[in-house]
Every structure is written in C-alpha cells, then in structure tokens.
Amino acid sequence: MPVEVLPADGLLAASWLLIALPLAGAAVLLLGGRRTDRWGHLLGTATVVAAFVLGVLCTIQLGGLDERSVDVDLFTFISAGDLDVRAGLLYDPLSAVFVLLITGVGSLIHIYSIGYMAHDPARRRFFAYLNLFVAAMLLLVLGNSFVALYVGWEGVGLASYLLIAFWFTRPAAATAAKKAFIMNRVGDVGLALAIFLMFARLGTTSFEGVFGGVGTLAGGTVTAMGLLLLLGACGKSGQFPLQAWLPDAMEGPTPVSALIHAATMVTAGVYLIARSAPIYDLTETASTVVMLIGALTLLIGAIAGCAYDDIKKVLAYSTVSQIGYMFLAVGLGPVGYVAGLAHLLAHGFFKAGLFLGAGSVMHAMNDEVDMRRFGGLWKKLPITFATFGLGYLALIGFPFLSGYFTKDAIIEATFDRGDTLGYALGGVAVLAAGLTAFYMTRLMLMTFFGRPRWEPGAHPHEAPRVMTVPMIVLAVGSVGAGFALVQAFPLSTWLEPVFGEPEEAEHVIAPLTISVLLTVVMALGVLLAWLFVGRREVPVIAPARVSPVVRAARNALYADAVNESLFMRPGQWLTRALVFFDNRGVDGAVNGLAATLGGSSSRLGRAQTGFVRTYALGMLGGAVLVAGALLAVTAG
Amino acid sequence: MTLANYLVLAAILFTIGAVGVLVRRNAIVVFMCIELMLNSVNLTLVTFARATGTVDGQIMAFFVMVVAAAEVVVGLAIIMSIYRTRRSASVDDANLLKY
Amino acid sequence: MTQTLGAGEAVVFWVLGPIALAGALGMVFSRNAVHSALWLVNTMLAFGVFYVVQQAPFLGAVQIIVYTGAIMILFLFVLMLVGRDTSDSVVETLRGQRVAATVLGVAFAALVGAGIARATQDLPAGGLGNEGGPANIPAIAELLFTKYLLAFEVTSALLITAAVGAMVLAHIEREPDSRRTQKELSRARFLTSNHPQTLPGPGVFARANSVAVPAILPDGTRSEASLATGIEPEEPDQMRRPTGREELGSRDAALGTLDPAPLDGNDR
C-alpha cells in the first residue's frame, strides 16, 4: 500500500550516519592496520553502539510522525542521459524494526566478541569485518531502491565470506567460505535478473516506482519477478535448494555464526520478500512457491538437525528450519507478513542467544564442538546453562515464551487459508515443531546433563562477564519478545504503514486448539528425546550401524551429494575439457603453427644449395614461366 | 623460308646456350655458353633490323658485341685470379652461400 | 610472313643452320674444354655468314674479326693457362640438374620458338636496300655518331675500364726482393751444377739426325745428356772419313791432298 513518503527532517535526515559510522569504523580499522590493534575492538564496538542509539532515536522520531514513512534522499548514483538513479534511504517502520534488530543484537555480539576473541591476535581485523557487515546490512534494509538493497546485499555476502574464512589458514574454513559465497552468488543472479526485469519493464528500481507501477504489468512478468526475487532470497537465507552452505559456515568464529547466520544476514531474504509485498500480493503462483519452499526447508532442517553431533551444526540446521517458518509465513499473503516478521525478531533474540551460549560452552571446553564430549555442564556453567535454557525453551515453543506466540501466529495463519494446501502445510509445520523440540532437547541433554564425557584435561569454567552479560540480555529478549511483539505492542500496528490494516481472519480452527496441539506436540518431542537420549548413556563414539533414515539425516539428506553430482562434477568436467582443449587445441594450434612455419622454413631453406647452377636453373624455370604466361595472355 | 626461320634458329641456339650454362661445370665453358646466347640475340637483332628496314638493329648488335668483348675480358681475368688462389676452375666450388 | 626470301638465301640457311646447331651442341657436350672452344668458333663463323646474308656486311666482318678472331682466341689463351686439364667428369653432382635443364630447355625453346613464329607471321621483310649493301657502313656511321653517340662514348669508356680492370685482376704482385738477380743465379750455378758454362745448343755435337744416336763430345766420349729417354741408343753406320790419320800415316797428312776422295768404301 503505497503510503505518502515524506522527505526527512531533523534527526532522520542524519539517518545515513547509521551506515556511515560502522563503515568508517571498518575503514579505520582496516586501513590503520596493526597500529589500531590495541583499541580496535573498542572502536568497533563503539560505532555499532552509537548506531544503535541513533537508531533508537530515529525510530522514536519516526513514531511521532503521522505518516510514518520517511525518505532520505542522499545523492545521485548514476546519471547518464535519460537514466537518473538516485541513492537514498527509506526509513519506514519495516526498516526501523530491522535497524533496531541489527544494531541492537549487533552491539551485544560486539561486546561478547571482545571477550570471545580476546586471545586471537587478529581481533582487530575481526571487528573491522563485523563493522563492515553491520554497515552493509544497514544499507540493505535502509535503501530506498532495489539497487541500494543490492549493494547492501553484495556487501553482506562479502562480509560473510571474509568472516567465515576469518581463520583463513584452515582449509576447511576457506572452503566453507567459498561455498557460501558461490551459493550466495547463485541466488544473487536471481535478484539481479529481477532488478533488470524491473528496470526493463518499469524504468525504475526505487521502491516507490516499482510498487507503484507493478500493477500495470502483465501477470507473467510479475510472477517472474516474484520467483527471481525468491531465488535471491533462498540464496541469502539458506533455503532449499541453496541451503547447504549454512551449516558449513559454522567454520567461522561463533560470534559470526550468531550475528550473521542467525539473526541478520540470513533474514535478509525474509526482508526482501516482505519488502516486495506489493509484488507478491499480485502473484498467487510466486507466493505459493514461497510457501512450499519454506515448508520444505522447514522439514529438511528439522530432520537434519536430529542427527548431528556438532553443536553449532545443530543450531545451524535449526536456523535453516526456523527461516523456513518465516518463508512459510511471508508466502501466505497479507496475513502472514507480520507474523513472519514477528518470528524473525523473536528468532533473532533466542537464536543469537543460543549461539552465544554455544560459544561460551566451546570457550569452556577448549573449542570442542562435539556434543558427545560434553555432558554434565550445568553445574560448571550455570549462567550459560540458564541463558541457553531460556533460549531453548523459547525456540521449542514453551508456553508463553517468545516462540510460543510467534510460531502459533504462523501456524494459525497457515490453517486459516482453509484449503488443502493450508492444511497440508500446517500439518508439516506442526510435525516440524515436534522435531524441533526433539533435537533441541537432545542437544540440551547431551550438552548440559548426563555424565561428563569430557576430554582428559578439560576444565570447564564460566565465561567472563563481558561474555555473559550479552547472553543475559538476549535471554531476557528471548523470554519477552514474543509476548511484546504479538500481544502487548502489536507489530501489526507498527507495521501498518507498510502492510496495511491487520485483518481479522476467519479462523478455521480455533486458535486455542492450535496452541494446545502445538504444546502437546512439543511435549511429545521432549519426551521422545528424553527416552532416546536422556535415559541411556550417550556413546562417545557415534554409532556406525544406524537406520537409513538416520544415515540420511547425518548426511543432511544428501544435499551435498546432489550438489556435487549436479553441479560440481559437470563443472569439473567442463573445466577439464576446457583445459584439455586449451592445451591441445589452442596451444596445439599455436605451437603447430610455429612448428609448421619452422619446419617449412627449414625445408624451404634447403633450396639454398649454394650452387650457382641451381640458381641458374631457377632463373631458366622462371623465364619459362614468364614466356608461358605471356603466350597464354596473348593467345587467350 | 621466311625471316621467322632465323628467329627460330636464334631461339634454339639461345636455349642450347642456356642449357649449357646449367650443365657444364668448367667456368670457362660456362662463359662460352653465355657468349653463344649473346650471339643468338645478335642474330635476332639483325633479323629484325632487316625486317623493319632500319639499321638500328645492327647498331644494337654492334654494341652487344662490344660489351660482350669487355665482359669476356674482365670475366676471364676473374676466372684466372680465382684459379690462382683456389687451384680450381669449377663453378661448383663456390658453394658456401647456403643454408 | 608474307614475303618469302630468295632461294640462294634458303640454301645458305639450310646448310649453315645445321652446322651452327651442331657447333652449339658440340660445344655443350664435348668433354675437353678446348674442343668446346673450337666448336664455338665453328658456330661463330656460321653466324658471321648469316650476318652478311642478312644485309649486315659490316657486322659480319666484325663478327669474324672481333668475336671469332679475338674473343675466342682470348678464350683459348685462358684455357691454356687455366682450364686445359680440368675436364668435367661425366657424373653430375647435382641431382636432377641435367633432367631439369633438358626439360626446361626444351620447354623454353618450344614456347619462345612457337611464340615468335606465331607473332612474326605477318612480319614484312622490309629489307634494307642500299643500306644493306654498299651503303651499310656510312649508314651505321651516321646513326652511330648522331643518334647513339652517348652510347658510343659510354661504351668506349667501358672498354677502357674493362682493359684496365683486367690488367689489375690478372696482375701478380711479387714482393720487392723475391726475384733473384743475375749475380745470385750464376753464383748458384757455379756452386752446385756440373755444367757451370752454358750448354751448347741442340745439334752441335750430334752425329746423326736420329734421336736414338747419342752425340759425341769433343774428346770423343759419348754425351750422356744427349741420350733420349725411353729409346735404346744406336750406333749409326759411320761414314768413311775422307781423310784421317790411319789412312794417311803421318800427321801432316791430315792436311789433306788435292786428289778427290775415292768413291768406294774402306779399301783404298
């Protein structure tokens, strides 16, 4: 619903500082080099905290306006003939929400990183890259055109690559970063094509222009746009079929996993689809595909998460699965955007908290990630246990914590569609909720309860305060965010300028029924986990003889194998064929030409015998030819 | 019997001289073959002088003879000096300018 | 050609043409270089006659005098100095040279001959008239010193240059003191040889015309130097000495008598 967008004044006019501050921080830290090592982390944290403060103030000012959408025009990006692309920011409720999420959670993670990366000599570089990421992500959510969004999109991809491969001397990290970047790239192609399409059909890529003019386009074009944008979103958010990079991205330091691969970057896809709501409202096909992708990924993530022993990988698959929830929500249409975004915000809190907790556990266990080597840590790491536990409860949808409210909203909206698709997808979502409870409980049991199965020489100790304080703050958010966003200060009201009046949908199934159903399913999941994992001794070595289902889950449902056989091997064959062709064909042609010339020249050289009589013979031959030619010409 | 007979005879003699240059190895005999070629050209010139009715052809033949004389003198002197240094008068011995 | 030539000329042509041809072929194919030169002389003489028949008497005379008489003789001189012994071997050192030369030669002759024959089909034999006969030399002179004057002068310069050049090329540079003087030569002769005096010319001490008869030196001994190699020496039949010491008995008898010598042999 296009709303009147005002030009900015007051503090909002300075909202570009939100991007500029972290960007300046990154520049100073990268260009300053080792000289900034001693205070680099403090500068990095300060810029993001300052951005957070500014963001809060801007949002307050925004809230005071009648028409709560503000356009901040900055400068001309491209001016060539008839083409005039202006760069600017759009500060409206949707972007405000994201700004607060990014800078808020970002600040907490920056503070956490001061402690987590304290022993790493490259800490300054880490903060520089984190700042770069925050700047790019803010540009992504604040840009007022698809091109500005794309710049931020690429920026976060770059930052993600740099941060995953932060310990670049490790081959696994370098490979994982490449994999992430390449799979992102595949998605970026979709986004780029969508932008080209917008430009070709509408002549503009600014949100105003596109959303205003999308109604005039043919149905097929709009569907194409929607599907291409979905491809981009899948790449960035790790949805099927581009989900394989997200678990591998856990090679990066844990704060990276918390910030980028839980709270912010992977939610960029959801932001894109939510922002493009006017487009998706017009195309039933694309929305349905979004829902299907979301549901499928939901299930894949949940199944895979049940079989991994690496604590970070389990959390990664959990992220994949939860974002599937969000995609499912935003694919539902006008009723779903708010629900999806609410779950996004709540998820940001508790997933970040869970990752920071995992980081704390790893920090305590000497960077060990294998859960089979944990056990009995609740006594040694009480604060971590408490915050982790609250995040866990929020994630599985324990009544009245965050996840309960937000997941309920989504599943309600799914069932409210009333058709078979709604029931089917709703059923899938319920099943996945049960699986979520199962694997998270398994994680908790293996990590914190049971007999200690630690490596000899391990001394688990609680994290320093600089790490535990952010965890506590996030735990509070995990607990209260859901209630706040859905009931107390409804997000739907805040996002009204973007998505319109919240409609009261016809409930096919009573909301209470759904809540009860979900709680029962959750309890079932917890029970099963306790039966299979908690009651028995956890083997230190993973059992080799398992059912095919477990084996499939351990291999992430063979996603990597499929990728390799579909893309990697043909790609390798292609490159090998090209190399072969280059060596034999091109080099052969060039060398063959040289050899031919050399050989023929040496053979021709033998005509120089040195004997005068041979040359005289040549002369006579030439004379014969000339005479013959003359005769032929005059006679013919 | 027409003037063309003389021309054909001259052509044949010219060819024989040319073949002689190619086939003989003694430098002086090669020189003599060249003289034969010059002579056949002289015959051609004289024949055409007769055909056109002017004396110009004969004068050209005259000049050819003079120049041939000069050439023979110098050429034979060269052959002699080569013979003195290399002890050989074969044209095949000057074959260093090769690949 | 439309105009055919006279019968006499035809006879001359058909007789001397093959001769010239034979001379050319002989020159090319003969192994001995001197023979080649002689064959060429033959051809050049035939050419000279051709010129005379073709109404170029001056040129014919010059051909015989200069070309045959001077240039070919020069060739022969140089052959004697240089190339007499160097006869070509029959074996050809360059592969395929003879075959290629023959093929190309035949092709060239055919092409040029056929081409000329076709091109000169309608060549009118203008004939030189008087200028081809008695007035030939004045006609040549007239053209030579007017129209072709520059060529004439240049050619004369060329001749001078050629002569000087040939002298330079043929000159043998000897070192200043390399020639032995007369004094050194005679001293060497007196020191080393058996005959310090000049030897008598041939025939001074000869007794007979035959080369097999050795000469007798003044003291009556046989001269070994007069023996020819490879021939058995013979003693000739001695003629009766008309007066001698045995016959006369006294020394004064050698002075001789006024009586005529007896005609019969040894008995008196």
Image (cartoon, coloured by chain):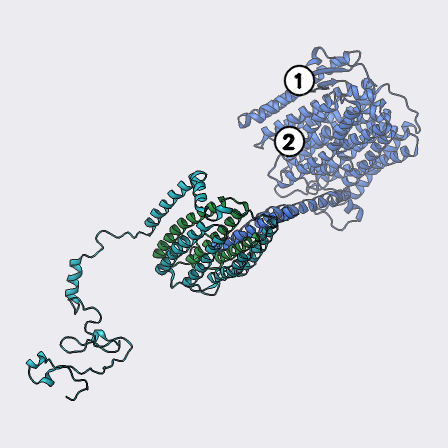
Chain colours: A blue, B green, C cyan
At 52% across and 55% down in the image, what residue appears?
A: B15
Which numbered disc covers residue A17? 1
The secondary structure type at the circle numbered 2 is: loop
Horizontal placement of A458 versus A387: left or right? left
Front residue (pair A292, A374): A292
Vertical arrangement, residue A449 with respect to residue A491, above or below = below
User: Which residue, as the protein is rendered here, is positioned at the far bottom?
Assistant: C267
What residue is shown with label 2? A463
Q: Where is residue A240 in the image (x, y as percent from the top left)?
A: 78, 37
Choose the circle earlier in sequence order: 1 or 2: 1
Q: How crowded is mark 2: few (under 14 residues within 10 Å), some or many (20 or more)?
A: many
Q: For the N terminus of chain A, which image quadrant?
A: top right
Q: Position of residue A604 (x, y in %)?
A: 54, 52
At 40% across and 52% down in the image, what residue appears?
A: B72
Residue A36 location, quadrant: top right
- Measure how far apart labels 1 and 2 are at the Cα level: 34 Å
Residue A489 seen in render: no
Q: Where is residue A127 in the image (x, y as percent from the top left)?
A: 62, 27
Q: What residue type is labelled 2?
A: Ala
The secondary structure type at the circle numbered 1 is: helix
Q: Which amino acid does label 1 sit on?
A: Leu
At 10% across and 79% down in the image, what residue appears?
A: C256
